[in-house]
Amino acid sequence: MIIGLVAVVLTAVAIALGWNRVRAVGRSGLIVACVLSVAATVAVQVNSLTQAFPTVGASLTSSEGSRLLDVTVPGPASRLTLSMYVYLPAAYRSGVRLPVIEALHGYPGTPETWLRKLRVQSYLDKEIAAGRMAPTVVLFPYQTPDRLLDTECTNLRGGPQTETFLTVDVPAFVRAHYSVRTDRDGWGLTGYSAGAFCATNLALRHPGQYAAAASLSGYASPGITIGDGTENTTNNPGWRLRHLPQPAIALWLGWADDDRGAARDSRRLAAEAHAPLAVTTAVVAHGGHSSAVWRQMEAPSFDWLSAHLARPAS
Amino acid sequence: MSLTGRPLILLAAFTAVVIGAATVRFWSRGGRFRALSRTAGVLLLEASLVITAGLAVNRHEEFYPSWQALRGDTGTETVTDRVHAGLLDVHARDGSFTWRPPGLRAWNLARPPTVTLPADYHDRTDVTFPVMLEFATQGAASHRTGEEVTVTLSPTATTSATALLSLPAELARDLRVSTVGWSVEGGPLAAAFVAAAPPGTAALDRPANTLPPALAAPLTLPAS
């Protein structure tokens, strides 16, 4: 960012000093340099906000003793091979099978958004240390092979099979490599923004695999074209709640009151829900669709998830 | 002025136009400070254009609907719930005891329920415990693991699931128990109780080792 700002100032100085010394082509070059430096600086700042193209790896350990591993998940079912961060709490040890939460990121974004902007490792350490959350393995998978392709965690017609990756390949990999619960009661989902839609949609579509899901500023529809029309039907939680039997899972729906889209959709989902689907709502007054809102929702949503998942098992 | 309102965007755009016009107008002036004034003009023009574009994008996407949101102020406090001590916490013995809550008569049971506490119930005063509700049926074995509060009921022909819906509140008043994720066992009456209870309260024949953990009071936000 600092380099970008220096480049912006330097190109401004160059255009000021060099304008009278060059002709049309040179002046055009100066203008282009100016525009490029500004565009690059804005892009760097936007990337810093979204972590869409992170450059530095995450920290591996915390002072609380938890670990964050960077692993590669081969996906035989989805044919996707993507990176994933794995949070192992300080209490993680072989022999005790811990519950699992898959944490899904927004778009644009990457798991790094959870780690950096939302400081998730710190929140998890704190909630577990306080006894408000059981020791839990938390997964932060990438959700697309192309950072600029919004999959909404669905199987795109002719595109990445992200739903299969997240619901088949990731669980299989984690069950094979870590000491975790393998039953449905021990698995949950969470996500912010597009990741919140993902969490809700995947939980409704796979109630045999996930017992609970938390949505932080989520939507009732994917907002993309999947290619088979299911964005209006089976990949649309609003449609599912109206037209299909509701599953016996628990949903936590959180939103900021001034985030009009997420607030409207979350309220609509909560209003459509009925037994055996259980819904808990949480609202913050201001903050829009921003990381400040999601940071405030993190601890309450993780506490709630832990209370709705099976406990660690010997 | 609203962060997402048209007036602010128009003001920013107008400012950009004015700065651009002034920069062009005074491009060849300024004497010995000409380089400085040109640089300042270019930088101000760039900044005003970026601000205008940023405001327009923010209005469209509604990332920050207000100045308050832009400052990261959510105007909401996260609250730490309290674990309320049960009325029987002091008197309840380790192991099992007979429970006689005020609403007992309405349940039409053959005898008062038997409550079995986890071994660490009295040591962990800052947590609520999961619950297993057992309808005693002939020959059925208990599936409790010892990590949950177990309530064993002896129903009669007149015991109804509807009447028993008051049991969770009675138990939560007397003991430190979770109000969600109960396991209920014991045939048709158990199934009827699960169906009648609010969603998420209980599941039928949930294996004891899949019950939630004993947890300290959670952090919460206001509900809608």
Image (cartoon, rainbow, N blue to C red):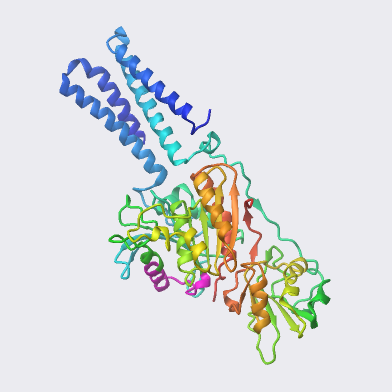
> Is residue A63 visible from the viewing direction of this image?
no
- In the visual, does A297 lie left or right of A194? right
- In the visual, does B28 lie left or right of B16? left
Q: Position of residue A162 (x, y in %)?
A: 36, 62
| Relative height, residue B25 to residue B119 (above, below) | above
Q: Position of residue A269 (x, y in %)?
A: 54, 57
Q: Position of residue B90 (x, y in %)?
A: 80, 69
Magenta region: which residues? A168-186
> Is residue B47 visible from the viewing direction of this image?
yes
| Viewer-side residue, A79 vs B53 | B53
Q: Position of residue A85 (x, y in %)?
A: 40, 59
Mainly helix, strand or loop, the magenta region?
helix
Which of the 4 image quadrants contains residue B95? bottom right
- In the visual, does B44 lie left or right of B198? left
Q: Is residue A184 magenta?
A: yes
| Viewer-side residue, A234 vs B53 | A234
| Viewer-side residue, A179 vs A144 | A144
| Relative height, residue A282 to residue B24 (above, below) | below
Residue depicted at 44% across the width and 48% down the height: A116
Q: Is residue B143 magenta?
A: no
Residue depicted at 38% across the width and 40% down the height: A46
